[in-house]
Image (tube, rainbow, N blue to C red):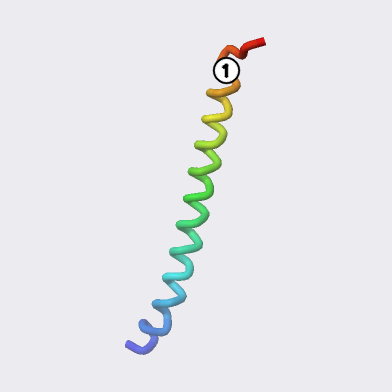
C-alpha cells in the first residue's frame, strides 16, 4: 500500500508530462495546418 501511495505522485507527473507532449504535438499540427491553409489562399498583390 505504501509503495502504491509513494508511486502515485510519480505516475501523475509522468501522465502530466505525457499529456503536455501530446498537447504540444497537437498544437504544432494545428499550427502547421493553419499555416498551410493560409499559405494556399490567393494573396492580394
- The residue lying toward the viewer, choosing from 8 and 3, is 8
Left-right relation of 16 to 39? left
Q: Quick one: which residue is furthest to the right in this view?
A: 45
Residue 7, image x and y in percent? 42, 79
- The residue lying toward the viewer, choosing from 22 and 42, is 42
**Which quarter of the picture shows residue 2?**
bottom left
| Residue at position x 57%, y 25% in the image | 36
Left-right relation of 9 to 1? right
Residue 31, image x and y in percent? 55, 36
SS category of the residue bearing label 1: helix
| Residue at position x 55%, y 41% in the image | 28
Q: Quick one: which residue is furthest to the front in this view?
A: 45
- The residue lying toward the viewer, choosing from 7 and 37, is 37
Q: Which residue is mark 1?
A: 40
Q: Compared to 6, does 37 lie above or below?
A: above
| Residue at position x 48%, y 51% in the image | 22
Quadrant occupied by the C terminus = top right
Q: Quick one: which residue is furthest to the left in this view?
A: 1
Q: Compared to 11, does 43 lie above or below?
A: above
Q: Quick one: which residue is furthest to the bottom in this view?
A: 2
Residue 16, image x and y in percent? 46, 63
Total number of numbered labels? 1
Q: Compared to 19, does 28 lie above or below?
A: above
- The residue lying toward the viewer, choosing from 30 and 5, is 30
Residue 39, image x and y in percent? 60, 21
Quadrant occupied by the N terminus = bottom left
| Residue at position x 39%, y 77% in the image | 8
Q: Compared to 17, does 25 lie above or below?
A: above
Disc 1 crowd, CA 10 A, few/some/many (<14, 14-19, 20+): few
Amino acid at each position: 500500500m505504501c509503495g502504491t501511495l509513494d508511486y502515485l505522485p510519480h505516475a501523475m507527473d509522468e501522465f502530466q508530462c505525457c499529456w503536455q507532449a501530446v498537447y504540444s504535438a497537437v498544437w504544432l499540427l494545428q499550427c502547421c495546418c493553419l499555416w498551410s491553409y493560409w499559405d494556399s489562399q490567393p494573396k492580394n498583390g
